[in-house]
Each structure stands twice: as C-alpha cells, then as structure tokens.
Amino acid sequence: AWRRFSKSRGWIMVAAARGRRTLSGRRLCRLDEIEDGAARGFAHGEGPGLFVVRQGEAVYGYVNDCPHWRITLNILPDRFMNRGKGLIQCANHGARFTVETGECVFGPCQGDSLTPVAVSVIDGEVVLAE
C-alpha cells in the first residue's frame, strides 16, 4: 500500500512495506539479482512502484516517479540508468539524477529530487525498511 504525505513541492508517495518479511521488512530480491551499476524495478501496491540501484554492496531505493512530469522514469523494464555515466535517467525527457541522493543534475527538473525509499541489504537480500 502507499501513503501520501504533503510536501512543499506537492504530493509525494511513501511506501508502506507489506508482503514477505525479513528482520527489517519486505524482501525485494537477492542482491546478486541486480547487476552492479544497474537498477531493477518493483511493483508495489497501486502506486507507481519503486526501483533499486546497486553500487557494489550498497543499494539506493526510489519511488518510480519523475519530479518533472509525475510519470514513471522507465519505459522498458529495469531501464533506469543512462549508458556509461552512472546516473539515473528519465526515459521520457532525459532528466538525470545522482544515484546517492536522487537529486536532478541535468534536465528540466534540475534541483528537484526523486523520492527516496529506505532499502538495505541483509544477508544478501535487498529489503524495504519498515
């Protein structure tokens, strides 16, 4: 399920974890199922879903919603990264975001940020934080 919270820039959506649980939250996948430097998308309730980017042993999660047009970032499944630059890219209009913070560093929403989703790795599993 998704819960909405008002923020100064409009509405954001925050995931409420449910489903299979581990010590910290809902299991999404094994870490080795996401290639290093790549991302993977996940359906979540009725909202836009979320995606997780892997950088080595670290993972970063975001709501799959571009702050510019409020549409999903990817057109093709699991295609969230631009080629060779290490940035998240909106396939609809080319905005680019840092992996670590979700801040837009190029494009029409420069200065805005993706909505983070707390994820972690526990015993080789990527899980949503509760």
Image: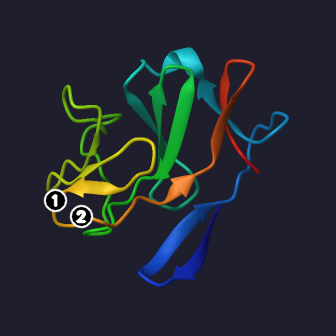
Residue 79's spot in the image, x, y percent? 29, 35
For the N terminus, which image quadrant? bottom right
Residue 101's spot in the image, x, y percent? 45, 50
Q: Residue at x 80, y 38 (%)?
A: 21
**Callout 2 secondary element:** loop
Residue 76's spot in the image, x, y percent? 26, 38
Q: Nearer the viewer, residue 114 or 46?
A: 114
Q: Residue at x 58, y 21 (%)?
A: 31
Mark 1 highlights which residue?
Answer: 107
Q: Residue at x 52, y 40 (%)?
A: 60
Disc 1 crowd rating (10 Å Cα; few below 14, some 14-19, many 20+) is some
Q: Residue at x 76, y 42 (%)?
A: 25
Q: Is residue 73 left or right of residue 6?
A: left
Cα distance, mark 1 to mark 2? Answer: 6 Å
Mark 2 highlights which residue?
Answer: 110
Q: Is residue 10 above or below residue 124?
A: below
